[in-house]
Image (cartoon, rainbow, N blue to C red):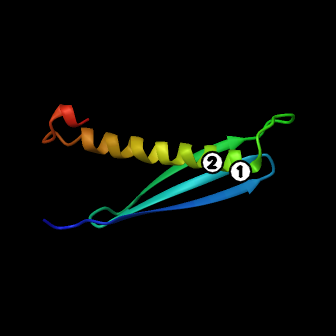
């Protein structure tokens, strides 16, 4: 059995009330995928910049996961029970 390694790099950028996260997946056999997520702190909201960063990161990772599921679903060789 051969091991395969993947790396996810997450970059978080805060600009005013907007926080953006970009998750880059780098895998052995894949050229890479990018997921993005955005969170906005509304004036008067109790959310902190850490909370916004966590939410933006979760959304970026969710976007990346959705892309991977879509890619796997397009592979007709996979049993549907795996998806």
Location of residue 79 in the rendering, given as x and y in whole percent from the top left corner: 15, 36
- Distance Cα–Cα, label 1 vs label 2: 6 Å
Tell me the quarter of the picture where residue 2 sits: bottom left
Q: Is residue 30 left or right of residue 24?
A: left
* Whole-percent x, y for residue 52 in the image: 69, 45
Extreme-right residue of the structure? 44
Q: Which residue is mark 1?
A: 50
Residue 7 against residue 70 in the figure, above or below: below
50 relative to 16 in the view: left or right:
left
Q: Closest to the observer: 43 or 46?
A: 46
State which quarter of the image contains the N terminus: bottom left
Which one is in front, 33 or 82? 82
Q: Are marks 1 and 2 in contact (CB under 8 Å)?
A: yes
Q: Which mark is residue 13?
A: none
Residue at (55% x, 43% y) in the render: 59
Tell me the SS state at disc 2: helix
Kindly identify which residue carries mark 2.
54
Mark 1 residue element: helix
Above or below, 80 against 27 in this view is: above
Q: Residue 54: percent from the left, percent from the top?
A: 63, 48
Query: Residue 47 sits in which quadrant?
Result: top right
């Amino acid at each position: 059995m051969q091991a395969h390694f993947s790396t996810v790099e997450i970059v978080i950028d805060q600009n005013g009330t907007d926080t953006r996260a970009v998750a880059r997946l780098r895998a052995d056999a894949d050229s890479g995928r990018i997921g993005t997520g955005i969170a906005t702190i509304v004036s008067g909201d109790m959310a902190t910049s850490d909370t916004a960063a966590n939410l933006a990161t979760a959304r970026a990772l969710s976007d990346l996961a959705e892309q991977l599921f879509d890619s796997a679903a397009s592979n007709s060789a996979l049993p549907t029970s795996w998806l």
